[in-house]
Amino acid sequence: MKYFILLLISILINFISWNYFGILFIVNLFILFYISNQFQNLSFAKKTIILLSFYLCLNISATFWLLEVDVSDAILTYIANSILFLLFSAPLFLKNIKFRHFFFIIFWICGEILLTKWDLAWPWLNFGNVLGNQWYLIQWYSYCGIYGGSLWILLTALNIFHISKQKKMDKWLFTFFLLILFPIISLYNYSFNKETTKINKIEKFTCFIPQKKYSNYSRTKKLHNYILKNNINHTIITTELFYSNVYSDYLKSSDISFFYNDLFKRNDSLKFIIGSEIINNDSIKFNGITCFNKNYTLFRTKKRYVPGTEFITPILRPLFGKSFYTKNYSDDTSKILNSIKTTPFVCYESIFSDFVASFHSDKIIVLTSEAFLGDNKFGKNQYLNIQRIRAIENNRYLLKSSYNGYSCIINPQGKIIKKLKPNFNSVSLPLIQSKSFYQKLIQSL
């Protein structure tokens, strides 16, 4: 009965922390440490059931919105993720080991990193992400990223746990004081210090965020007419999957080629960053981006797909069928970086902290449809908060262009400084060359 009540409390804390006040997640981890301390004399099977139940409650109460997207996929995600969490909790099963909680923290951080490196990666519930809704407390993520955030949350919860159970607690109080300085200093800097990062220059863009499922031809015609009417002479950005079925010479030989040829005749400085479904043939498709101007057409394919919905790893295809998209590591990413000074990311890619930080660019551009979130505001808000974290980690202005979610510009402190409306938006994005410490760390590794 005691464990059942703790699980109910955990469910409530999870919902509040992942959607409103992330710092409350410390309470949930306090419950985890308390449970692991209380069940030491239970059998291995009972320990497994209790911990697995705790992680199932965590997954469901934090990402319940997955059930609106696809019930079977959501259930599989909850179960698989909970089992993986259980594996990385192996030190909690040890009896009479003085430092088992510290071993657990080491295992957990290593697990968060390792679980981003395979085809079934779902890093949404990396503990450091929970603080995204209180971005003003995590300005220090520019030094350590979400993994440092996960470590901070775990250590803070462990300190509170030891303070609650010991009479002599001087060393734990001192450690807790040091840990709590991180969000206090962050809040002070966010509130009172002006932005000090050197801005090299400001680049103009036009974002086209269509709200209807036009054909490729209709979308291009609308874009063409807007550019001519408003005399646009800078880079145009769309959302994810703006075009479908784009083959290698599609822009030159299809029914939309007239519009681009006309635009380039009038203005050869135009550039386009277009979300595209790229095809080699009927059986090989990629979700990606087409970057082009008068002189070149470059393709970048998505490197991190949504497991199941977009990509099924080969070993699981006999069970779940053919993968919708194909992975491809040989594309024009480096040429695109040289051309537009950034690597545009496609939707799900942007939730991978070290993946985004591994690219050096003067801005972050994310093209997304947010289809994998369904139409749930909680999922969309969590995704938006993850984008705040990416801006902080990389010390960059971030432009998020979304077909079915929140389109906006986020500054390097994680604050939304401009919300974009449907259809056409003229935006100015400050460019920053200097790397954050976290970027330097990831790129050196």
Image (cartoon, helix red, strand yellow):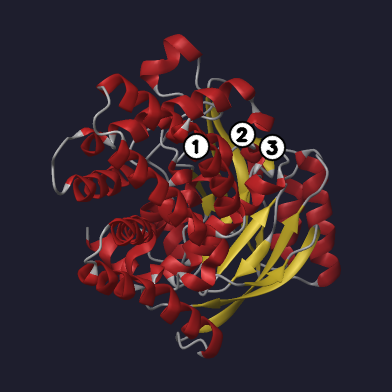
Q: Which residue is mark 3?
A: 374
Q: Note whether residue 249 is visible.
A: no
Quick one: which residue is furthest to the left in this view? 97
Q: Give the left or right position of residue 101, taking residue 60 as reference.
A: left
Q: Earlier in the sequence, mark 3 or mark 2?
A: 2
The reply, left or right, for residue 344 in relation to residue 234 is left
Disc 3 or disc 2, which is closer to the eye?
2
**Disc number for residue 66:** 2
- Do tag 2 and tag 1 residues touch (Cβ < 8 Å)? no
Asked if marks 3 and 2 touch (Cβ < 8 Å), the reply is yes
Percent of width and height locating residue 394: 42, 68
Q: Which mark is residue 431?
A: none
Q: What is the crowding at mark 1: few (fewer than 14 residues within 10 Å), some, or many (at least 20)?
A: many
**Residue positioned most to the top:** 318
Seen at 79% across and 62% down, the residue is 421
Q: Position of residue 89 (x, y in %)?
A: 29, 37
Q: Is residue 440 left or right of residue 238?
A: left
Q: Amino acid at mark 1?
A: Leu
Is residue 380 shown to the viewer in this render?
yes
Q: Nearer the viewer, residue 326 or 245?
A: 326
The residue sitting at 59% across, 45% down in the picture is: 12
Name the amino acid type tagged 2.
Leu
Of the two numbered discs 1 and 3 on the same chain, state the one appearing first in sequence. Answer: 1
Asked if the residues shown at circle 1 and circle 3 are in contact, with their CB atoms under 8 angstroms apart, the answer is no
Q: Earlier in the sequence, mark 2 or mark 1?
A: 1
Q: Which class describes the residues within 10 Å of circle 2: few (<14), some (14-19), or many (20+)?
A: many
Mark linked to residue 7: 1
| Residue 16 versus residue 76 in the image, above or below | below
In percent of width and height, residue 48 lies at 33, 25
